[in-house]
Image: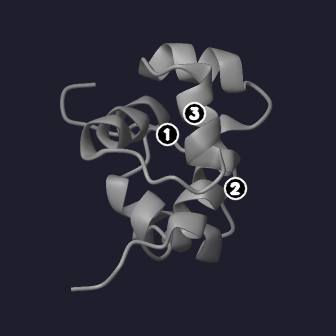
């Protein structure tokens, strides 16, 4: 079993938090100090990571491992922009 790369998780979180850490923390239901801990390398619990994934529209795997396959396909097709939620019944 492989280890979680805490620095990768932190980098990915910084990417989605951008310049709004206070609002982001509030929206996902964690304290600002907890969010700063995650941004500095502490790996969030599965529950918190799930809420972050749901809030951002990114798969949990994107925060934990290599690139998101869907994002790579979009990049290869030359499509840029914020991730969009796709689902049945929308």
Q: Give the residue number, with chain letter if any, for mark 1.
A: 84
Q: 64 and 89: which one is in front?
A: 64
Q: How far apart are marks 2 and 1 (CA)?
A: 11 Å
Instruction: Place residue 10 in its image quadrant.
Output: bottom right
* Whether residue 13 is visible: yes
Are dots 1 and 3 in contact, CB under 8 Å? no
Left or right relative to 35: residue 4: left
Against 26, is 76 above or below?
below
- What is the quadrant of the C terminus in the image? top left
Q: Distance between the residues labelled 3 and 2?
A: 27 Å
Q: Is residue 25 above or below residue 45?
A: above
Instruction: Rate crowding at label 3 as few (under 14), some (14 to 19) or many (20 or more) other CA atoms within 10 Å.
Output: many
Percent position of residue 33, x then y: 61, 27
The quadrant of the image that shows the N terminus is bottom left
Residue at 36% of width from left, 43% of height from top?
49
Q: Which of 26 and 18 is in front in this view?
A: 26
Residue 26, given in percent of the width and then of the height, sits at 53, 13
Q: Which of marks 1 and 3 is in front?
A: 3
Across and down, in percent, residue 79 comes to 66, 60
Q: Pointer 1: residues within 10 angstroms few (<14), some, or many (20+)?
A: few
Q: Where is mark 2, residue-wise?
A: 80
Numbered circle sitting on residue 35: 3
Q: What element carries label 1?
A: loop
Residue 74 visible in the displayed image: no
């Amino acid at each position: 079993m492989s280890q979680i790369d805490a620095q990768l998780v932190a980098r990915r979180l910084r990417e989605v938090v951008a310049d709004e850490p206070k609002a982001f923390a509030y929206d996902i239901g964690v304290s600002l100090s907890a969010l700063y801990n995650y941004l500095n390398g502490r790996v969030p619990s599965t529950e918190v990571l799930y809420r972050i994934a749901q809030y951002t529209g990114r798969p949990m795997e994107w925060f934990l491992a290599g690139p998101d396959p869907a994002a790579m396909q979009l990049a290869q097709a030359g499509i840029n922009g914020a991730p969009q939620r796709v689902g049945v019944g929308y």
